[in-house]
Amino acid sequence: MKLNNTLHIIFILFFVQIGFGQNNLSKEILGQIFEKSTSVDRVNIINNTTQVSTISDADGKFSILAKEGDVLVFSAVNLEPYKRRISAEDLNLSLLIIKMTAKEIELKEVVVNENYGITAENLGIIPRGQKTYTPAERKVYTATSTSVDKILNKISGRTAMLKKEVNVEKKEMLFRKIEYLFDENYYTERLKIPADDIKGFQLYCMDDAEFAVSLNTKNKTMSMFLITELARKYLIILENEK
């Protein structure tokens, strides 16, 4: 009787072991990879459990050995990584469909200037190295370019008027430069110029030839040095006007 019971237990354990072994037996899985409705080739597939790997073909199809519970990892340069834990249902499918997502690539803003580098010199319209003029300077040049023009414009006083326009234009350009170079706090806190007198002080600086040169040559160090001395002189003028 005891022998029969022992044999019965052995048979039960044997069949349980067989069943367990069958459940853990690897099976070849056939699958196909899609990104939206398009099949994807050259996707790397690796079984994280067994480290077996393969690559999808031109139709996005692949085959790999796996068992229930194994994790398959799918990766490609232009796709988001995807993991799939194999279930019993997956093992029974004739074709395992894997849907992957394309990576979102953020592009930096690109500004295209089609006319960059195109100048009158590059196009051969004017000779290279020719002096360029502001609108006011061009008027003066035109008014004094021929002997007849010189005589007529001197008589009419037009040349003097145009030269005055050039001076005004140059001062306007210098004024814009000094406004850009120094903010209001610099005048009031560093140079001690009253806020109401800043514009007047800027115009005062415009008349200083050395300071004008420093602005035109973009020599900020020299401009800061000169404007400090100009501020000292201007404050004396303001004090004397009281």
Image (tube, grey):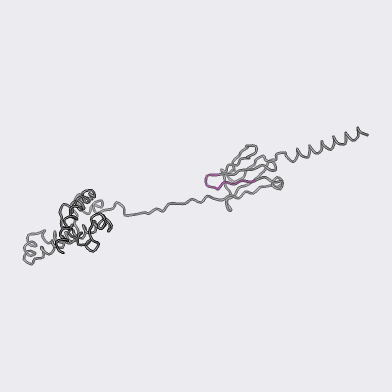
Magenta run includes residue 81: yes
Give the residue at the far right of this rendering. Answer: 1
Range covered by the magenta-colored residues: 76-84
Give the residue at the far bottom of this rendering. Answer: 156
The secondary structure that dominates the magenta segment is strand
Magenta run includes residue 79: yes
Horizontal relation, residue 68 to residue 225: left or right: right
Horizontal relation, residue 193 to residue 157: left or right: right
Residue at horizontal 7%, vertical 64%? 154
Q: Nearer the viewer, residue 22 or 224?
A: 224
Horizontal relation, residue 241 to residue 98: left or right: left
Q: Quadrant of the N terminus?
A: top right
Q: Nearer the viewer, residue 242 or 63?
A: 242
Q: Percent position (x, y) of residue 151?
A: 6, 63
Up/down of 230 relative to 44, above or below? below
Q: Percent position (x, y) of residue 160?
A: 10, 63
Q: Percent position (x, y) of residue 120?
A: 24, 54
Residue at horizontal 74%, vertical 41%? 23
Residue at horizontal 65%, vertical 38%? 49
